[in-house]
Amino acid sequence: MTHARLVPCAAVERIAGKVSGTWLFQGTRVTVRALFENLEGGATVDGFLEWFPGVTRAQVEAVLEHAQRSLVEA
């Protein structure tokens, strides 16, 4: 069985030396992990965007869609 290779999410970046090389929302220092931790803790997307104004709704939606696709395709 072959698996489709998931295309990288354009809303994030990983740069060695920037926040220890963790996945960040592109153009920010906000970690993707922060989104998932906040959502798991009961936050809404609107709340997250309010707390992290450098992140756009489009970036959050792209990350969530990417995560969903990766689960479906895994």
Image (cartoon, grey):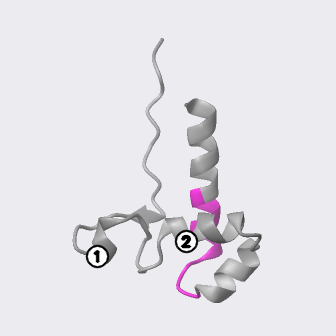
Quadrant location of the C terminus?
A: top right
Residue position for label 1: 18
In reply to whether residue 72 is colored magenta, the answer given is no
Which residue extends farthest top? 1
Looking at the rendering, the stretch of residues picked out in magenta corresponds to 53-63
Query: Residue at the spot x=65%, y=73% of the render?
Result: 57
Within the image, what quadrant is residue 2 found in? top left
> Quick one: 33 or 45, which is closer to the camera?
33
Residue furthest front in the image:
41
Question: Percent position (x, y) of residue 50?
Answer: 68, 87
Res. 62 image quadrant: bottom right
Quick one: label 1 or label 2, which is nearer the N terminus? 1
Say left or right for 63 vs 18.
Answer: right
Could you tell me what secondary structure mostly forms the magenta stretch? helix
The residue that appears at 64% across and 45% down in the rendered structure is: 68
Is 64 drawn above or below residue 73 in the view shown? below
**Position above or below: 36 against 5:** below
The Cα–Cα distance between marks 1 and 2, rounded to whole angstroms, is: 15 Å
Q: What residue would you read off at disc 2?
A: 34
Q: Is residue 70 left or right of residue 18?
A: right
